[in-house]
Amino acid sequence: MKNYIHFFCSAALTAAVALGTASCIADLDQSPIDPQMNFEFDQQATFAKQYALLGLSGQQGPAGSGDLDGQDEGESNFYRTVFNLNELCTDECIWAWQDNAGIPELTNMSWTPSLQRVEWAYTRLGYDILQMNYFLDNIEGLDDEESVRQRAEVRFLRALHYWYFLDLFGKAPFKEHFDDELPVEKGGKALYEYIQDELAAIEPAMSEPRQAAYGRADKAAVWLLRARLYLNAEVYTGTADWANAKAYATKVIDSAYELCPDYAQLFMADNDENGAAMQEIILPIRQDGLRTRCYGGSFMLVSGTRIAGMPFAGTTDAWSCIFARAAMVQKFFPDLSAVPMLPAGTSTDGVDLSSDEKIDAVDAGYGTRTVDMVRAAGDDRALFYSGVGGGTDRKIKMVTQITGFKDGLSIVKWQNIRSDGGTTHDVKFPDTDIPLFRLAEAYLTRAEAAFRSGDSGSALNDVNELRKRANTGLLDTVTGQDLIDEWAREFYLEGRRRSDLVHFGLFTTDTYIWDWKGGVPAGASVSDVYNVYPLPSSDLNNNRNMTQNPGY
């Protein structure tokens, strides 16, 4: 059973103060904790709000009392905004409905400073930091053990948000206190060093690995964020730091966390109760089908990857939005002709598809179930679907025009189904927590850092640890191509792909081309300008301290 604190709102100054964009809080049905209205500060409720910011979009859920005025509440949730900017422009997936505002620009890598989806991410990150500053200012000076730990955890969350700013935009509107001063610009090496120093400062006050309540950050989360920072050091500062990336990844690997023996269970509805999954998840975004309803968390991941009629969908609300690009499928099937697909001209006329079990039986006859896909790929991570559920005309090869959801394979990695066969809390909104940080990242970080330092043997061992868990063939040697492909196989649709492609030098260049890169079916390189996003025009118009990224 999940335990929750009611997520009261700690309302902030408008974004004319925070970012120069509309970002104030709507009226609440319950008494707000508003620093402008002299309400008593509620430490525990406001602390809970800091973690809630990762997975919720407002006070009511799933919509109707959003954190950010003037924004689409479902679209402006923290996880969904950063997911969109890190996934929809990459080789992993496409948002099917290209008539949605701002989607073609992400698909084709052609965004501008006026793109609303960029503004949503920028505004959400800044809003969350403002909330964190409010909490930190209000507990300054408290020295009891719990306050000290809460302060460290919220500083961690703030550092995480500043890391997203650094990774996505190369800079941040920076401030550490809740006041009416405009943020100042901090980017590149200065922001990198700030995040590093913050994480070093808070580490002693954090809980030991796996000693915090599930859902709260601990020392392993601090170490893993540092490892992530160092892995990208050359992008952020111009100087690589493979030694620290390897050292901090090793600290995580040597801690109390262990790999889940079953990859699929990491993304199922009981991943907060199943001990096998929990032992790998270092920092989850908590989700519950009844109590944390939101259109931007795991609901988007489950519903967005399903179409009506698919068996065992786990939700009654199939959006039919996100499908796999051909390049992603090729990570498991280099030869696309080996993908289990329905024979051309397959018809289900007169076939009884009235239940999940009957659809599954038909799929079994064609060998197009997910279990058949996994078997054909020889990799437990190949969680795709190509059967009759939802229609018989799915495609697999690179399409010449994006027309809809069935232009590629369905991805069924994210599930609102329990590993123990039990009943979920809701048939529409998932219980599935989002493993924002998990142990496998430390293995691949250490592998890459070792490889780039000339230690291919150690890199091979760490890659093969994950491949053993996936029940796939072990490698005899490891190359840079193996590593970037392994990042995709292990972490596809987890909101990080753009960052990996950037630090491998593959995101914009012609070294690696995928379907619809650059806006053409076969793919094309784009300007290196697109390695970072532009600052929104709305912020530049209202904050004289911020300057636009070069090329925009």
Image: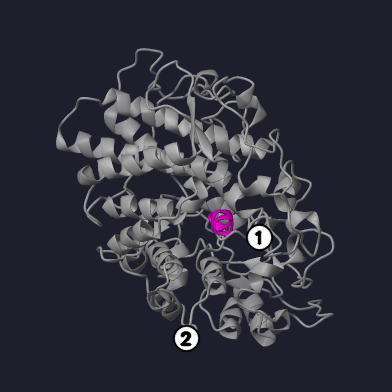
Q: Which quadrant, please, contains the C terminus? A: top right
57 part of magenta stretch: no
Q: Nearer the viewer, residue 45 or 357?
A: 45
Which amino acid type corresponds to the residue marked 1 in the rendered image? Answer: Cys
Number of numbered discs overlaid on the protein picture: 2
The residue at 40%/22% (across/down) is 32
Q: Please rate how many residues cluster around mark 2, counting C-alpha atoms within 10 Å: few if below 14, some from 14 to 19, many from 20.
A: few
Q: Nearer the viewer, residue 510 or 127?
A: 510
Q: Is residue 294 left or right of residue 190?
A: right
Q: Which quadrant, please, contains the N terminus? A: bottom left
Query: What number is the disc on residue 93?
Result: 1
Which residues are drawn in magenta? 495-503
The residue at 41%/74% (across/down) is 459
The residue at 41%/40% (across/down) is 52
Which amino acid type corresponds to the residue marked 2 in the rendered image? Answer: Asp
Secondary-structure class at tag 2 = loop
Which mark is in front, 2 or 1? 2
Going from the N terminus, do you reach mark 2 or mark 1 first?
1
Residue 212 x, y percent position in the rendering:
25, 50
Q: CA distance from mark 2 to mark 1?
A: 30 Å
Secondary-structure class at tag 1 = strand
Q: What residue would you read off at disc 2?
A: 476
Query: What number is the disc on residue 188?
Result: none
Residue 215 x, y percent position in the rendering:
34, 50
Residue 75 x, y percent position in the rendering:
61, 40
